[in-house]
Amino acid sequence: MKKEDNKIEEKKKGIPKRFLIVFGAIVIILILVYCLGFKRNKKRITELSAMDGVSEVKEIWHIPFSFISEKYVVTYQQPLDWNNPSAGKFPQRVVVNVRKNSKISVLETDGYGLMDNIMPGMLSFENIAESAKLYNGNYIHVEHRLCGKSRPDDMSNEALKYWTYYTSENTAADYHHIYTTLKSVLGDKWISTGTSRGGLETNVYSYYYPDDMLVYLAYVAPCSDGLDDERFYDYVYNTIGNEAFGEEQAKNYRDMILAFQVEAMRYKNDLMPKYEKKVNLVATNYVDYATPERLYDMNVLEFSVQFWQTGHDFKKIKKVLDMPDGSDKEKEKKAAALYKLLLKVQDPRDWSTNYLPWPFYVNACTEYGQYHYNFSYLREALEKEGLDDRLSVTEDMEAEFMQNMVFTPEEKNAFKYDSELHDNLVASMETTTAKHLMIYGSTDPWYSVAMPVKESDNIKIFVHPTLPHSSCITNMPKDKKKEIISILDNWIGEKAK
């Protein structure tokens, strides 16, 4: 018994020792990984710090053995109004990712705040723009003016005095200044790129500064005509998917989405208590007009947009629609499934006044335009089912529905649309000498409001035959991908890897 007891005691003593050895090894490995991903480059920091308007340069950790060799957050003090410097300044953050021996620099015109506004530390893990990967380029990611942390300390979404400076002209001047200063450090071969609203910003940048970049590469960039562009929902309910799946199958898919929307409205009264709790979370804030009932209706309407935009796994919709609802227990289960998929596809926080996308609505209602929130297709389907009483949004509310749902009356009165940018931007595409490459997806709702421009020697447009908002160069069909890269190689004067 004593020998067995001794063995047990030896095992008890041995476990902590082995654990400490393993734990110590893990700590050492993590330290080495951290050090490999954080190499202080005093010379680079000095160069960046000396650039005009730069107030701070902070080197940050990046994943070792990755595409990037150096990573910095550079903060500029930018004029609120480039035409009136006395109006004051704001801090604008720019993430500078340096690739060793790179000949190309890629400036991404992000339309929102950087990812660390959602989750701290995300800048170390952010995705690198596709074109930077293709050409082993430096990657410069710009946080949009007055978004995220690129705003004055005393600014809030209710501070109307600052939104006066939230213009396309000022935004383009921000990019121009960042490019002008960084090219002295990173070289003079540059590409501007952006996706969705960022793609629109790329096209706007080219309008104001056509000679800055070798190429303006815009992904799925909208160009809405006015505040009530009817093309958007007409496309979503009538023709989207025809090219990708054929007219008959595409109609089946559109009908399936509409059937899901009808079911979501059928169960509206059952789901409202849970939905009200969701929209009344402490972290969100909505204007008085945006009642939970109206938010729910908007949520159901926009489900069709987001489902097409982010991908289209119709099996998920079919699974919910096929659920039985004969008994109370079955109805409860189906209601839960409807609610889960509805909110997974379209989050109501998108209309919260303190959520990341909110500044987009300011630009939409002043210069960029937006689509008409058209409930007519949903309303007609509900009437056929005898459910028209479920819809709290009436026809007479639709014309200014978006503005009312996201702005206070004071804000709505301040943010007035002007078509000058849209008209000038579209007209400029007929005469510009800047090189543009535009990419769209045929199953993306935003393709319905694509830039109305014809191809020419310096403007090329490619549409992915089946993909939505995720369309890019690398997922294009092989022949199109080859053609795109050949065009870029010629325009940039470098070969893609």
Image (cartoon, rainbow, N blue to C red):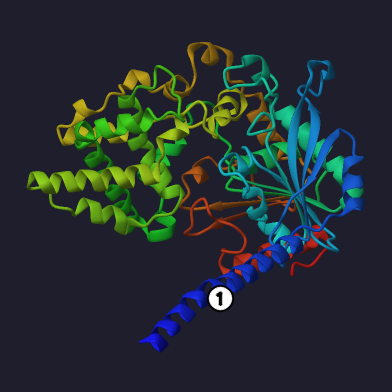
Residue 69 is drawn in which quadrant? bottom right
Place of residue 14 in the rendered image (x, y in percent of width and height, measured from the top left): 52, 77
Place of residue 181 in the rendered image (x, y in percent of width and height, measured from the top left): 88, 41
In this rendering, position of residue 190 left or right of residue 264: right
Q: Which residue bears the numbered disc 1?
A: 18
Residue at horizontal 44 percent and vertical 84 percent from the top:
7
Determine the secondary structure under disc 1. helix
Place of residue 167 in the rendered image (x, y in percent of width and height, measured from the top left): 69, 25
Q: In this view, does 382 lie above or below 482?
A: above
Along the viewing direction, whichever of 98 and 370 lies nearer the viewer: 98
Along the viewing direction, whichever of 298 and 272 lies nearer the viewer: 272
Which residue occupies the extreme left position in the image? Answer: 327
Residue at horizontal 39 percent and vertical 55 percent from the top:
312
Residue 171 is drawn in which quadrant? top right
Q: In this view, does 238 lie above or below 69?
A: above
Instruction: Give the number of callouts.
Output: 1
In this rendering, position of residue 278 left or right of residue 448: left
Q: In this view, does 233 lie above or below 250?
A: above
In this rendering, position of residue 354 left or right of residue 400: right
Residue 178 is drawn in which quadrant? top right
Could you tell me which quadrant the C terminus lies in? bottom right
Please name the amino acid that badge 1 sits on.
Arg
Residue 211 appears in view: no
